[in-house]
């Protein structure tokens, strides 16, 4: 994997992960000081906007990682001990991205809740899986 691809991936993980966690905390865990407030935290709209604006960085990085890292290892069979976490991250990536886009266009409140739950679940699983894959957990060997 090229150094630029790695930087792009971790920039996407850091920005999208941090803004997603911050937005989730503000949206679901903060309580507004004003009972008539439309938002729970003054930075909530900014975090949501940054999350949506940074997500294409991560999606682009996932595309480069697919071509330069995942596909060659799947076809060549390299490092089979890390394949489980890699495949898990790969599968959850698609669901995370699709649920994020569906969440933005959902008009019905019920579907919006469905996509929120799906996106949060996939995102938490993706962050955990990406960390586990990067650190080599489950492989019996240390990360390089």
Image (cartoon, grey):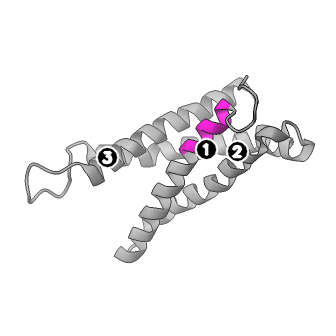
**Residue at label 3?**
25
The residue range painted magenta reads 127-135
Callout 3 secondary element: helix
- Marks 1/2: CA–CA distance: 6 Å
**Residue at label 1?**
129
Are the residues at dot 1 and dot 2 in contact (C-beta closer than 8 Å)?
Answer: yes
Q: Earlier in the sequence, mark 3 or mark 2?
A: 3
Q: Is residue 88 visible?
A: yes
The rendered magenta stretch, by its main secondary structure, is classed as helix
Q: Which residue is at 14% across, 51% downward?
A: 32
> From the viewer's perspective, is 18 left or right of 11?
left
Q: Position of residue 94 (x, y in %)?
A: 63, 57
Local crowd at mark 3 within 10 Å, few (<14), some, or many (≥20)? Answer: some
Quarter occupied by residue 43: top left
Callout 1 secondary element: helix
Q: Which residue is at 71% across, 40% downward?
A: 64
Relative vertical location of residue 6 with respect to residue 70 in this rendering, above or below: above
Quarter occupied by residue 122: bottom right
- Marks 3/2: CA–CA distance: 27 Å
Q: Position of residue 14 (x, y in %)?
A: 49, 34
Q: Position of residue 22 (x, y in %)?
A: 35, 42
Are the residues at dot 3 and dot 2 in contact (C-beta closer than 8 Å)?
Answer: no
Quarter of the picture containing the C terminus is top right
> From the viewer's perspective, is 112 left or right of 71?
left
Local crowd at mark 1 within 10 Å, few (<14), some, or many (≥20)? Answer: many
Q: Which mark is residue 85?
A: 2
Callout 2 secondary element: helix
Q: Which mark is residue 91?
A: none
Q: Position of residue 90 (x, y in %)?
A: 69, 50
């Amino acid at each position: 994997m090229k150094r630029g691809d790695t930087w792009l991936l971790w920039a996407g993980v850091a920005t999208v992960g941090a803004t997603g966690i911050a937005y989730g905390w503000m949206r679901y865990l903060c309580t507004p000081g004003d009972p008539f407030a439309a938002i729970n935290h003054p930075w909530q709209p900014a975090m949501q906007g940054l999350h949506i604006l940074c997500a294409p960085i991560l999606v682009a990085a996932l595309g480069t990682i697919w071509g330069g890292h995942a596909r060659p290892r799947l076809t060549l069979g390299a490092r089979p001990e890390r394949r489980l976490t890699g495949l898990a991250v790969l599968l959850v990536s698609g669901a995370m991205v699709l649920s994020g886009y569906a969440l933005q266009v959902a008009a019905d409140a019920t579907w919006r809740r469905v996509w929120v739950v799906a996106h949060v679940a996939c995102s938490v699983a993706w962050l955990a899986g990406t960390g586990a894959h990067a650190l080599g957990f489950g492989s019996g060997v240390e990360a390089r």
